Amino acid sequence: MKLWEAVKSVVAIGMLPEENTRELEGSRDPANAKDFLEKAAIARDRAKRLDAFIFECDQRV
């Protein structure tokens, strides 16, 4: 496994704590779902940027 893949996995998991997932399960409140989706979008964006940065570093080495 390449370094950038491992870091990306750890960061993506860290951005979406398990408590958020459990909190959303069974919840029918649209505000909770919206908040969760916003956090997921932010996490995906951060993971993509980190992935690109680490990939660049990997290519230079």
Image: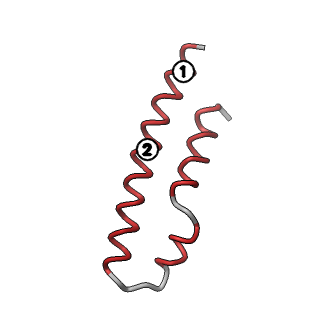
**Residue at disc 2, secondary structure:** helix
In the image, residue 21 lies at what x, y percent? 52, 71
Considering the image in quadrants, where does the C terminus appear? top right
Q: Name the amino acid, label 2.
A: Arg
**Quarter of the figure with residue 27:** bottom left
In the image, residue 60 lies at what x, y percent? 55, 13
Residue for badge 2: 46
Identify the mark nearer the N-term, 1 or 2.
2
Residue positioned most to the top: 60
User: How many residues crowd mark 2 within 10 Å: few (<14), some (14–19), many (20+)?
Assistant: some
Q: Name the amino acid, label 1.
A: Cys
Residue positioned most to the right: 1
Q: Residue at x 59, y 46 (%)?
A: 9
Say if 44 sits above or below 24 in the image.
Answer: above
Q: Residue at x 56, y 63 (%)?
A: 17
Residue for badge 1: 57
Q: Which mark is residue 47?
A: none
